[in-house]
């Protein structure tokens, strides 16, 4: 950290050793703040970047001891840590300016009209989008086994827009823990040998392999999930930008799939498969659409639909099976006996219900009449699969980072296949878009148990919620 003549411009220059070194910025920012050095007097730059015309000078004066306390609320730290990964060279100056202003206005981050706050949110959003693309579009190619160790290795090439490589290392380490791999990028490389993760210097495109036999599996998988009835080219290219196509083996078959979509859709209609309309772009739109949905027997019943509720872009989405009798009458999810039990366990696990988005796999109440009573019936696989369209649409709008699926129906609605709760609970599953999925029992299951079985399942349920709470804390850190 150096200082220059303060009379005509910035006085201090802070050189970041790494463009993603938020911890270094935080330490230097605290030292500058304790010396009451204003944002206008500081130039933040990366190592190797072109020097500022007004930067340079002598060392920063030693801070007084103890220095004044520097305050930064949780929202600022969450956004700042992510925004620091943006490639905009002004980002660290913005962070320091906001930190400076926070000392005089502790509620600054709540002012969404403030220009600096809006810019910080835009940087954070761009970085999160880039991370999402990295999670979704990294494709590993197998390289020949080493003659000495006979060990295979997988190598991928990716071109991030921002300095997100090291920040996303943990995602790939957890997801591909059992294989040796490298992710090469122009902004640095990740290497995992099954035991240790290391970071390397930038690589070139020609350093990565161009293809392997596994690519046919990618193409076959993509062709199998391609639904011509849902084809919206503008939305598809927005979610899968063309700049990534050159690294995606499945992209080679997209033109042919698009060209044949109309013919395939006609075949689906002839076969009686469900055809959906254009995907709603708002939760209100989904609510209106599911009320009118008649694509399965439950939707054709006289029950009213129940839409999910909660904030947009929460850390957590909770997915249940279907609305019950009380939920259908009040048209709100999780307000019946099982919902009340869930509330008690959420409170015990310190998971605020009002901070999560709650919804169900199936949007209508499946039941049979017994006198004046309406007896719950479990939805069938076809009904869950049909309603999955609406849950996917909700997810696309809500954008949770963690999903808690309550019961087998919720798990099937998210995964598209049935799983055994006892085999998958307790460990996260990483979905294709990078969202983390936790699966546990439905609280209505706990209500049906008694004695030792009830005590054991309650213990497991509480353990699962505690694990989710821990992951939410890690996400927020």
Image (cartoon, helix red, strand yellow):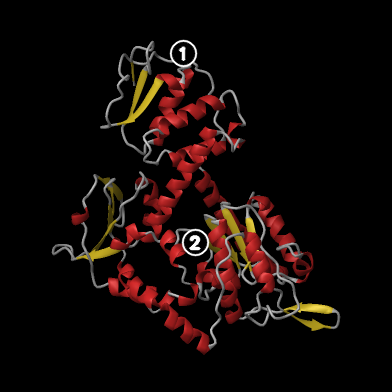
Q: Nearer the viewer, residue 438 or 325?
A: 325
Number of numbered discs on residues: 2
Q: Which mark is residue 142?
A: none
Q: Nearer the viewer, mark 2 or mark 1?
A: 1
Give percent across and percent down for residue 90. 40, 33
Q: Nearer the viewer, residue 315 or 289?
A: 289
* Helix, strand or loop for disc 1: loop
Give percent across and percent down for residue 15. 32, 27
**Is residue 23 left or right of 213 when viewed as pictured?**
right
C-alpha gap between disc 2 and disc 1: 48 Å
In the displayed structure, 62 sits above or below 154; it is above
Mark 1 burial class by Cα count in 10 Å: few <14, some 14-19, many 20+: few
Q: Nearer the viewer, residue 211 or 325?
A: 211
Give percent across and percent down for residue 315. 56, 51
**Is residue 261 left or right of 151 when viewed as pictured?**
right
- Residue annotated with mark 1: 64
Q: Quadrant of residue 298?
A: bottom right
Mark 2 burial class by Cα count in 10 Å: few <14, some 14-19, many 20+: some
- Residue annotated with mark 2: 427
Most extreme residue toward the right is 372
Q: Examine the rendering and report whether any part of residue 74 can be seen.
A: yes
Q: Residue at x 47, y 68 (%)?
A: 232
In the displayed structure, 406 sits above or below 229; it is above
Q: Examine the rendering and report whether any part of residue 174 can be seen.
A: no
Q: Are marks 2 and 1 in contact (CB under 8 Å)?
A: no
Give percent across and percent down for residue 13. 34, 22
Most extreme residue toward the left is 147
Q: Quadrant of residue 29?
A: top left
In the displayed structure, 149 sits above or below 373; it is above
Which of the marked residues, 2 or 1, is nearer the chain's N terminus? 1
* Helix, strand or loop for disc 2: loop
Q: Residue at x 53, y 76 (%)?
A: 418
């Amino acid at each position: 950290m150096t200082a220059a003549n303060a009379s005509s411009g910035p006085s201090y220059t802070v050189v970041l050793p790494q463009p993603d070194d938020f911890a270094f910025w935080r330490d230097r920012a605290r030292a500058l703040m304790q010396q009451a050095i204003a944002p206008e007097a500081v130039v933040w730059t990366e190592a190797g970047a072109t020097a500022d015309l007004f930067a340079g000078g002598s060392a920063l004066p030693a801070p007084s001891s103890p220095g004044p306390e520097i305050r930064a609320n949780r929202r600022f730290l969450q956004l700042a840590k992510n925004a620091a990964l943006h490639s905009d060279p002004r980002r660290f100056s913005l962070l320091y300016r906001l930190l400076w202003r926070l000392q005089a206005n502790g509620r600054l981050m709540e002012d969404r009209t403030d220009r600096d706050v809006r810019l910080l949110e835009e940087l954070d959003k761009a970085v999160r989008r880039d991370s999402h693309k990295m999670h979704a579009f990294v494709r590993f190619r197998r390289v020949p086994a080493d003659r000495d160790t006979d060990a295979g290795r997988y190598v991928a090439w990716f071109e991030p827009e921002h300095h997100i490589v090291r920040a996303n290392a943990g995602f790939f380490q957890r997801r591909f823990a059992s294989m040796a791999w490298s992710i090469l990028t122009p902004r640095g490389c990740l290497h995992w040998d099954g035991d240790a993760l290391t970071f390397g210097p930038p690589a070139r495109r020609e350093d990565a392999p161009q293809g392997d036999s596994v690519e046919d599996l990618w193409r076959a998988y993509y062709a199998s999930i391609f639904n011509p009835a849902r084809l919206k080219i503008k939305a598809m290219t927005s979610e899968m930008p063309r700049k990534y196509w050159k690294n995606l083996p499945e992209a080679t078959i997209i033109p042919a799939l698009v060209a044949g979509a109309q013919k395939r859709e006609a075949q689906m209609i002839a076969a009686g498969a469900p055809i959906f309309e254009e995907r709603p772009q708002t939760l209100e739109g989904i609510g209106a659409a599911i009320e009118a949905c008649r694509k399965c027997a439950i939707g054709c019943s006289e029950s009213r639909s129940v839409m999910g509720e909660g904030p947009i872009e929460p850390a957590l989405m909770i997915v249940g099976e279907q609305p019950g009798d009380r939920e259908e009458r009040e048209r709100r999810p999780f307000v019946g006996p099982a919902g009340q039990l869930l509330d008690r366990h959420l409170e015990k696990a310190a998971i605020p219900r009002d901070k999560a988005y709650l919804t169900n796999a199936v949007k209508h109440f499946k039941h049979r009449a017994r006198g004046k009573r309406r007896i719950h019936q479990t939805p069938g696989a076809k009904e869950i699969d049909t309603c999955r369209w609406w849950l996917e649409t909700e997810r696309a709008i809500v954008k949770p980072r963690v999903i808690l699926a309550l019961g087998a129906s919720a798990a099937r609605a998210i995964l598209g296949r049935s799983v055994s709760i006892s085999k998958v609970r307790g460990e996260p599953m990483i979905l294709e878009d990078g969202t983390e999925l936790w699966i546990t029992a439905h609280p209505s299951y706990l209500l049906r148990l008694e004695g030792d079985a009830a005590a054991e399942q309650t213990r497991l349920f509480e353990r699962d919620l505690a694990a989710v709470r821990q992951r939410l804390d890690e996400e927020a850190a």
